[in-house]
Amino acid sequence: MVRNVCRWAVTITANAKDGFKIHTRRWVVERTFGWFVRYRRLMVDYEYHTETTEAVIQAAMIHRMLRRLHPNP
């Protein structure tokens, strides 16, 4: 059904022979999500439209970048 409706290819992978494998860049994503704790509107998804949530995320990241460029006002 997913293949017909969304045109996605679903594949099932075999278990890794080496056991648990750590993803090399996962910490970057986890750190970024951790930054959202400072922004109340991103703690819980209050928004009805995803576009609004995307805009709030962009505003939060712009705020982070500006504070990094000029730390003390």
Image: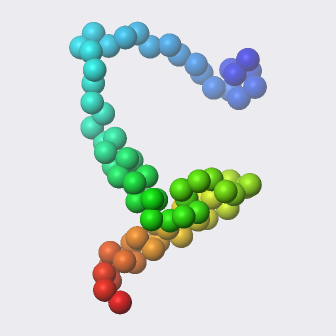
Where, by quadrant of the figure, is residue 71 drawn? bottom left
* Colour treatment of the image: rainbow
Find residue 51 and report its horizontal and vertical position in percent. 68, 58
- Residue at the image position 47 percent from the left and 71 percent from the top: 62
- Residue at the image position 67 percent from the left and 57 percent from the top: 46
Viewport quadrant of the C terminus: bottom left
Can the viewer see residue 51 in this picture? no
Find residue 32 and report its horizontal and vertical position in percent. 40, 54
How many labels sit on residues? 0
- Residue at the image position 69 percent from the left and 57 percent from the top: 47
Picture layout, residue 38 above or below residue 12: below
Viewport quadrant of the N terminus: top right
Viewer-proximal residue, 70 or 43?
A: 43
Find residue 63 and report its horizontal and vertical position in percent. 45, 74
- Position of 42 with respect to 33 (left or right) is right
**Residue found farthest to the bottom:** 73
Where, by quadrant of the figure, is residue 13 drawn? top left
**Residue found farthest to the left:** 18
